[in-house]
Amino acid sequence: MTPQNARFAHDVETLVMAMPAAQTLQLRFERIEPGEVDLVLPYQESLTFRPGQLQATPIFAAADFAAVSAAGTLLPAGWVNATIDCTLKIVGPADGTELVARARVIHAAKLLTVAEARVYARQAGKESLCATMLATARNLPPAG
Amino acid sequence: MTPQNARFAHDVETLVMAMPAAQTLQLRFERIEPGEVDLVLPYQESLTFRPGQLQATPIFAAADFAAVSAAGTLLPAGWVNATIDCTLKIVGPADGTELVARARVIHAAKLLTVAEARVYARQAGKESLCATMLATARNLPPAG
Amino acid sequence: MTPQNARFAHDVETLVMAMPAAQTLQLRFERIEPGEVDLVLPYQESLTFRPGQLQATPIFAAADFAAVSAAGTLLPAGWVNATIDCTLKIVGPADGTELVARARVIHAAKLLTVAEARVYARQAGKESLCATMLATARNLPPAG
Amino acid sequence: MTPQNARFAHDVETLVMAMPAAQTLQLRFERIEPGEVDLVLPYQESLTFRPGQLQATPIFAAADFAAVSAAGTLLPAGWVNATIDCTLKIVGPADGTELVARARVIHAAKLLTVAEARVYARQAGKESLCATMLATARNLPPAG
């Protein structure tokens, strides 16, 4: 996929990491390519439902931030986007030392972009699938 | 709907409020009836994407906890449940002093329960719709 | 909800019933109000997975046509709409003499409208829930 | 993925093609591998919303039958499955001479299997994406 903004990686990372929610979740980008993003959410006791097991909310967060960031890599400079529709299917425990969400764009249009994400629980370099998401982001031109 | 557990309200509230994630999100039950739950998530700067606006993650959290709790009110004593499938559609800003998620069960079976939730941004007693969710919870018998 | 087109019921019914797919499915509107539609899909052996049981496709069809029609009742004259996103949860058998899908709008905006539908299997005046849907329709202004 | 039933391809194809709905839709399997299925739904005027354009229902049908069939390839002999949850995102026109739905299993467990499908409109050997689906199938042991 061809980016419309040469600085897409810088712009997406800067935008997301400025969000208080992204800082609270301690998100970290591992890879940013045109239409593809890998995002890490480290295990935090405060986000579990019991010790060692992350609750659905951080699983959603990892998938959602990865999907909307992947969609964002294909936007023109100055545009932003926001999730309007997410379906999350949880298929395994979220019990590693961190979650890694791998997202990629399925279809990018001017107004709406569809992306998917897989979320893996990672421990000692081994990954096991814990969830999959389909998401739609709405694209917004620069205000003005 | 008829509860199978006379202490359903106590059991659901105790189970959820013992979760670290529920405490981090400062969740508070406002109403627990058979098959219906209203749950409050107060505004927290740490969960915003910019000042005054909650990010999608706390919207999901309010809807998901409310839906799974509503489903939980109809379980036999000792059973627990967990979300396996959520679809969230965001339709308005999450900008009040708190979110209130109103959930109710659509269909309860032995193994799987389907519930819906509406999430409202509340400010000075006025509520505006910000999202709707359909969720499926898996029901698990007591271990042992 | 307030319609923007005084002839909304006529226009929605005419538009839908002109579609070959609606005729194939033998759809019939039972009620059309602003933001709300009840739609009937009669049992047809050709749409079953085994005698007496409709397959998921006609369940989807009833829910989808009802939801997009409910959304259509709130559009200005001359606008049309199309489904872009549907989540269908099937919770019971589709085994009556007809399906009735009851849809209503959750949120209507200029560009996108969110609606929900419940699908019931109806037999001798008794209805049992067989599915629930959340749908998003995209709204399109008159061409030209 | 490893099939548990050596005759998985024969069994899935026989089961699906015996369904009246599959015959009505003129479905045809193009490929059946463990956990993966390609399924064709030919253009039929009777399934359009206007000449040349298939309505959402046949798009759903192609995706749903492909996803549940892919899930079925991994079941033990004698087991059957049924869709309980589908999310369909439509991203382009369904205007070719046939739809081809390519499905594959994301996660297979004893009770529930999650699969995804992409639906393409195909014309003169060229394919363009028209929809994507995430689906959950429930697995049922032999009756008796």
Image (cartoon, coloured by chain):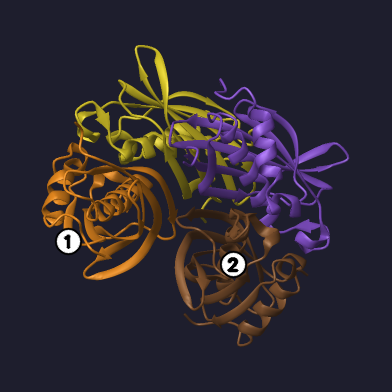
Chain colours: A brown, B purple, C yellow, D orange
Compared with residue C86, is residue A132 higher up or lower down, i.e. above or below?
A: below
Left or right: residue B32 versus residue C101 is right
Q: Write the residue at 31% across / 58% down.
A: D95
- Where residue A63 appears, as percent x and y from the top left, is 56, 64
Classed neighbour count for the residue bearing mark 1: other residues with Cα under 10 Å, few (<14), some (14–19), many (≥20): few
Q: Nearer the viewer, residue A17 or D27?
A: A17
A81 or A54: nearer the eye? A54
| Three-letter code for the amino acid on which mark 2 is drawn | Val
| Picture mark count | 2
* Left or right relative to A44: residue C22: left
Q: Tag 1: residue type?
A: Glu
Question: Residue A81: which quarter of the image?
Answer: bottom right
Residue B131 appears in the rendering: no
Residue count near mark 2 (Cα–Cα under 10 Å), binned few <14, some 14–19, many ≥20: many
Query: What residue is pinned by disc 1?
Result: D30
Instruction: Confirm or deny contact between disc 2 and disc 1 (CB under 8 A).
Output: no
Residue that badge 2 annotates: A68
Q: Position of residue B70 (x, y in %)?
A: 61, 34
Return the chain for callout 1: D
- Chain of the residue that carries numbered disc 2 in the rendered image: A
Decide which of C15, D6 is in the foreground and name it. Answer: D6
- Residue at 48%, 30% in the rendered image: B108
Please state which of residues C24 and B42 is positioned toward the viewer in this rendering: B42
**In this orientation, does residue B125 appear?**
yes
Horizontal side of C50 relative to B13 (left or right) equals left
Q: Quadrant of residue C89?
A: top left
Residue at (50% x, 58% y) in the render? A93
Where residue D138 appears, x then y in whole percent?
Answer: 34, 43
Helix, strand or loop at disc 1? Answer: strand
The relative height of residue A33 versus residue B130 in the rendered view (above or below) is below
In screen coordinates, is C63 left or right of B75? Answer: left
